[in-house]
Amino acid sequence: MASETPVSRAARRFLRGTWRLTAALLAMWAAVTFGVAFFARDLTFELFGWPFSFWVGSQGALIVYVLIVVVYAWAMNRREAEAAELPPDLSAQPERTERAGRISGF
């Protein structure tokens, strides 16, 4: 195996962080989606004349979903800006072979 360069380590760290962020936000989405539905019967007090479970299910979950999208966009913009400052990783790109002639297979 070829020796690992600092740039390839940075790329691997970027991808690992992206997967962690995605997994954490997906877990939050699942908790809100299934948690509210599961515990809705236990939320029996009223808020502005409506059951609290109605407010959480109809409004609270949507607010959390929008916040998940905003957090993901903000975090990924920051991460991508930091990654853009790194030099390009030439070892991660496949070798390109020049082909002469017509492209076949279409």
Image (spheres, rainbow, N blue to C red):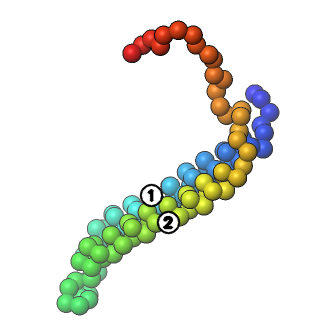
The three-letter code of the residue at mark 2 reads Val
Residue that badge 1 annotates: 26
Image quarter for residue 64?
bottom left
Tell me the quadrant of the picture where the N terminus can be found. top right
Q: Looking at the picture, how far across and down is residue 86, in whole percent?
A: 72, 49
> Judging from the image, what secondary structure is the residue with disc 2 in?
helix
Residue found farthest to the front: 101
Q: Is residue 90 visible?
A: yes
Mark 1 secondary-structure assignment: helix
Image x and y of residue 4, in percent:
77, 37
Q: Residue furthest bottom?
A: 48
Residue at the image point whose x is 64% and y is 27% from the top: 94
Dot 1 or dot 2, earlier in sequence: 1
What numbered label is drawn on residue 61? none
What residue type is disc 1 on? Leu
Residue at label 2? 71
Left or right, 40 with reference to 96: left
User: Label 1 vs label 2: CA separation?
Assistant: 12 Å
The residue drawn where x is 67% and y is 56% is: 82
Rendering coords of residue 48 (x, y %): 23, 90
Residue at (33% x, 70% y) in the render: 61
Measured from the top left, where is residue 14 in percent x and y? Answer: 64, 50
The residue lying toward the viewer, choosing from 2 and 35, is 2
